[in-house]
């Protein structure tokens, strides 16, 4: 096909899409899928286009085995997406097939029909078939009572893709009807359902929050908290992002209250996801809305809560970057307190907070606060726990970027030639890191040595004055 053009090959095999043997039809579909993906449909004329769609519809409807469904879907989706606006005359017929198959008694067929809607939604939009999509949206909405979780997940995915392309304003069913139906589905424990449902709710929270009452959003927040326990990372990530959108929609205060209470639970994974959610809420609603409540929560005398607050600060400074310069002085005392804490994890998390903070405020004139916090980090270089020492070295590297290598060099010089080997080891490790990452900045720090007859030590480029 690459040598003679895709159209030439497709002409020769298109009629085989109606062959009696199903495995053969499957192979033909796969071949056409790959040819069109690689070469497009520019050399497919209108006669061949009709035969191609007729054949692929036949193959799609006639399949009986379950393992072929993904291949048929891919082939169908590729052909329709490649044709783009040329597919318009065939869309009513395709939608008729989809509607018929959504009523089918076999769950596999229903799932495949819903998946096909998700694949061709973009083409329906480019062809201007918004009315057809609205109609499909209503039909899919009626099927939200589906008992098979695999099928329900696909139906939610199809609704999500229709929402994406048609927009929240023109969506049928209207968002104020759709969202209350999604809230109970969030309780479903099947992974595919959870992922698609949270994605859809997040999309609505992002693009059309005004259609739903704040009370409904709060209800959704309580369901999302449960989602943070999910095994799949995609679901946890989607829930955390949705928290950000919901906070943007109804203001951060109520969402904050739920999340801060959640730091008190025992389950570590839940707490970590909560801290990420807090950081995202801080990023979407500006940090000043979240920081006062977060810092106040640090006074609660529970180790888990305090660690959670520090972790949330760490993620927050990672996300907001140079906006951190407005908040560095307000959190300095809190980080300082954590760096002096007896608990290892406190010191580790505070060191990683300092790393993100230092990297964010580079060159923005906050060196005094960083120098102050570096003085509290430095005594931790003799820790033996690998996580702690990793975080401490990261914090020192972050400070090196913002304060300049020469400042860190003055700290290291005192221990490079210490009599105890353990002391020397860590000091040389820090010095070697500086040597690897910033040897050019070390040059001015070395002493001046007079030239002798064999070697020239003077660095004239450092002695230039303007």
Image (spheres, rainbow, N blue to C red):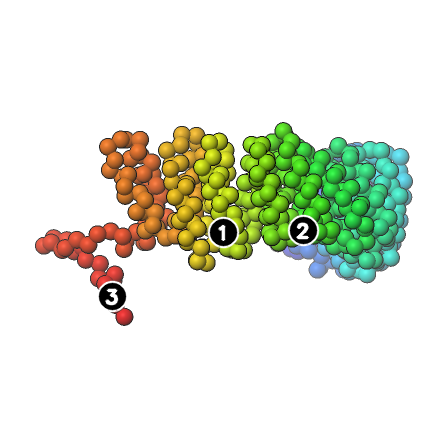
Left or right of 370? Residue 103 is right
Q: State which mark lies toward you, 2 or 1.
A: 1
Q: Which of pointers 2 and 3 lies earlier in the amino acid sequence?
A: 2
| Residue in the foreground of this view, choosing between 23 and 329 | 329
Find disc 3 in the rendering and name its residue: 464
| Residue in the foreground of this view, choosing between 141 and 416 | 416
For numbered disc 1, what is the local secondary structure? helix
Mark seen at residue 224: none
Left or right of 404? Residue 57 is right
Q: State which mark lies toward you, 2 or 3.
A: 3
Find disc 2 in the rendering and name its residue: 37
Find disc 1 in the rendering and name its residue: 329
The answer to whether the residue labelled 2 contacts the one labelled 3, judged by CB atoms less than 8 Å apart, is: no
For numbered disc 2, what is the local secondary structure? helix
Circle 1: is it few (<14), some (14-19), or many (20+) Cα within 10 Å? some
Q: Position of residue 405 (x, y in %)?
A: 35, 50
Mark 1 and mark 3: Cα distance apart in space: 37 Å
Q: Which of pointers 1 and 3 lies earlier in the amino acid sequence?
A: 1
At x 49%, y 51%, the residue is 329
């Amino acid at each position: 096909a690459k040598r003679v053009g895709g159209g030439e090959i497709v002409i020769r095999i298109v009629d085989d899409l109606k062959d009696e043997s199903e495995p053969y039809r499957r192979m033909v579909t796969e071949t056409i899928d790959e040819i069109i993906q690689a070469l497009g449909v520019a050399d497919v004329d209108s006669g061949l286009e009709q035969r191609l769609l007729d054949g692929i519809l036949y193959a799609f409807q006639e399949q009986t085995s379950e393992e072929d469904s993904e291949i048929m879907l891919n082939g169908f989706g590729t052909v329709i997406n490649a044709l783009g606006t040329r597919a318009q005359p065939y869309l009513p017929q395709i939608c008729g097939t989809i509607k018929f198959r959504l009523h089918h008694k076999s769950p596999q067929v229903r799932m495949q029909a819903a998946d096909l809607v998700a694949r061709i939604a973009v083409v329906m939009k480019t062809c201007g078939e918004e009315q057809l999509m609205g109609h499909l949206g209503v039909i899919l909405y009626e099927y939200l009572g589906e008992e098979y979780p695999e099928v329900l997940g696909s139906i939610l995915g199809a609704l999500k893709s229709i929402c994406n392309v048609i927009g929240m304003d023109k969506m049928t069913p209207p968002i104020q009807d759709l969202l209350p139906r999604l809230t109970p589905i969030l309780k479903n424990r099947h992974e595919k359902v959870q992922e698609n449902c949270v994605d859809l709710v997040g999309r609505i929270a992002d693009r059309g929050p005004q259609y739903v009452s704040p009370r409904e959003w709060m209800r959704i927040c309580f369901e999302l908290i449960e989602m943070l326990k999910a095994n799949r990372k995609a679901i946890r990530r989607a829930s955390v992002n949705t928290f950000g959108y919901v906070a943007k929609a109804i203001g951060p205060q109520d969402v904050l209250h739920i999340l801060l209470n959640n730091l008190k639970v025992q389950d570590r994974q839940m707490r970590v996801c909560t801290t990420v959610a807090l950081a995202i809420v801080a990023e979407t609603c500006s940090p000043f809305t979240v920081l006062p409540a977060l810092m106040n929560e640090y006074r609660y005398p529970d180790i888990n809560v305090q660690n959670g607050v520090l972790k949330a600060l760490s993620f927050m400074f990672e996300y907001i970057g140079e906006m951190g310069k407005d908040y560095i002085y307000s959190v300095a005392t809190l980080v300082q307190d954590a760096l002096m804490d007896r608990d290892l994890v406190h010191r580790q998390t505070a060191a990683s907070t300092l790393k993100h903070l230092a990297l964010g405020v580079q060159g923005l004139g906050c060196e005094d606060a960083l120098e102050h916090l570096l003085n509290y980090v430095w005594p931790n270089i003799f820790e033996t726990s690998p996580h702690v020492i990793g975080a401490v070295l990261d914090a020192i590297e972050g400070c090196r970027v913002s304060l300049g290598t020469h400042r860190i060099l003055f700290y290291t010089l005192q221990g490079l030639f210490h009599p105890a080997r353990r002391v020397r080891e860590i000091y040389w490790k820090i010095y070697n890191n500086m040597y690897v990452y910033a040897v050019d900045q070390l040059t001015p720090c070395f002493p001046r040595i007079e030239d002798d007859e064999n070697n020239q030590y003077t660095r004239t480029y450092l002695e230039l004055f303007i």
